[in-house]
Image: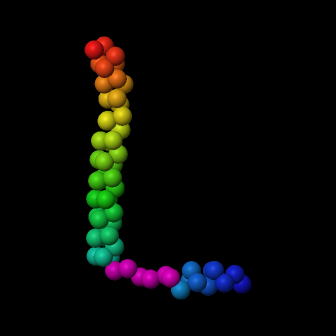
Amino acid sequence: MNPNTHELAQLKIRIPANLRKQLQEESIAQQRSMNAQINFILKQFLQIPSNVQQMKDN
């Protein structure tokens, strides 16, 4: 028997429903925050070409 499978079997822990719900909500909030940060950074990158063009025009 693989010793790793034995270790994994010991890690099965029942999480109460209310705690699981709280963890899911926190996870979703973190994902939304990260998505907002990524969107902000991407928008900055999308603006770079127009900024460079303005510098060339001046």
Q: Residue at the location (36% across, 34% down)?
A: 45
Considering only vertical position in the picture, is 46 above or below 33? above
Whether the magenta-drawn stretch holds residue 15 is answered as yes
Please name the colour scheme applied to the rendered image: rainbow
Q: Is residue 37 above or below residue 56?
A: below
Give the residue drawn at x 29%, y 65%.
26
The dominant secondary structure in magenta is loop
Horizontal arrangement in the rendering, residue 10 relative to residue 1 (left or right): left
Q: Specify the quadrant that holds the N terminus.
A: bottom right
Tell me the quarter of the picture where residue 3 sits: bottom right
| Residue plotted at (63% across, 80% down) | 5
Rendering coords of residue 16 (x, y %): 34, 80
Residue 40 placement, left or right of 5: left
> Where residue 36 appears, x then y in whole percent?
29, 47
Q: Over which residues does the magenta segment extend?
A: 11-16
Quadrant of the snapshot with the C terminus: top left
Depicted 11 relative to depicted 24: above or below: below
Instruction: Return the residue found at the far right.
Output: 1
